[in-house]
Image: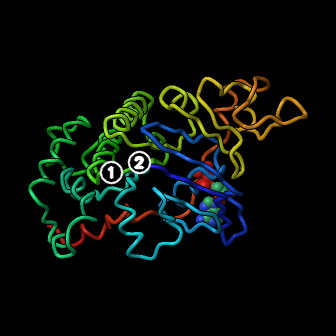
Amino acid sequence: MTLDVTDLRKTYPTGDEALTGIDLSIDGSETTAMIGPSGAGKSTFIRCVNRLTEPTAGSIELDGTDLTALGDDGLREARRDIGMIFQEYNLVERLTVMENVLTGRLGYVSGWQAFRRSFPPADIERAYEILERVGLGDMENKRVDELSGGQRQRVGIARAVIQQPTILLVDEPTSSLDPETSNTVMRLLTEIAAEQDIPVLINIHEVDLATDYADRIVGLHDGEIVFDGPPADLQDGALDRVYRGGDPPESDAPRPADATADGASQGDAASDGVRVPADGVVSANGGTPDRSASGGP
Ligand code: ADP
């Protein structure tokens, strides 16, 4: 699977220029962490890729198909290939763990089956396997509103994985979690990328988690990429550019991936700002409408 984003721009109706021309290619089974301060455009980027937010310009190709050109039907089909995992989990609180996981299959069953929430035995079997894999082996009948944050995020991961996506997009998966649980979730995501042989793109503002778990770091500042390279190259000067928009050390600006050290410490940079929530409550996960819950017991 290859995701090829070219000159992606997003200007909100308010005039906010969230993305000013992003070029990014992702493939293989790598974990890429997109870092940057609050307001850098990380969430807008991920939401544009899934077209939960409409880009203003640019192309987003998933294995050669331009997602920006798709109509409703094409988009519904393409979204099956894109697993989304959200900061606030986006689960149906009053349904069970199993029911939530199976909503990841809604894009594959008929409208009537979806309405009845009736899934093929193979899907149910696979759901048990995945729940086991994410460490929720005995929790299938628990209601989601009885779970801890870490457990909910694992349900979100299981729901994305059962879709059999060809790429996983993850939006701030650890923001609501304690440090230990954050590490567990990051480890799980990177292991799953390797096991499923799919790329994972994770938006995250905690630099330490990004460098500990990702193979590649993409740094965003004010809607543009100011760093792209392995974690080892993310030294103080590069961090300064990502978190403060600081100038490169030389007047002759290096390419983002050639960052050299100077300036702020990682601790300073990472403590930048308070997260400003983006717009909109997301109600759909690649064809997994929450309304599936509405007819159920
Ligand atoms: P991040 O995820 O890095 O915190 P966002 O993508 O949420 O950044 O936001 C990028 C910029 O776009 C910010 O300036 C933010 O205020 C703006 N923005 C995000 N969502 C909206 C929206 N719905 N309407 C107007 N501006 C928005």
Q: Are marks 1 and 2 in contact (CB under 8 Å)?
A: yes
Identify the residue shown where x is 79% and y is 26%.
Answer: 263
In front of the other: 246 or 60: 60
Mark identifier at residue 112: none
Q: Amino acid at mark 1?
A: Ala
Percent coordinates x, y for residue 214 in the rendering:
50, 32
Percent coordinates x, y for residue 170 in the rendering:
45, 47
Q: Quadrant of ligand 1?
A: bottom right
Identify the residue shown where x is 28% and y is 46%.
Answer: 158
Q: Amino acid at mark 2?
A: Leu
Identify the residue shown where x is 26% and y is 37%.
Answer: 134
Determine the secondary structure under disc 2: strand
Determine the secondary structure under disc 1: helix
Q: Is residue 76 left or right of residue 146?
A: right
The correct choice, above or below, for 296 with respect to 6 in the image is: below
Location of the C terminus by quadrant is bottom left
Q: Is mark 2 within 8 Å of ligand 1?
A: no
The correct choice, above or below, for 143 with respect to 108 in the image is: above
Residue density around tag 2, few if under 14, some if 14–19, many if 20 or more, within 10 Å: many
Residue extending farthest left: 121
The correct choice, above or below, for 181 with respect to 290 in the image is: above
Residue designated by label 1: 160
Percent coordinates x, y for residue 187 in the rendering:
39, 30
Residue designated by label 2: 168
In front of the other: 227 or 243: 227
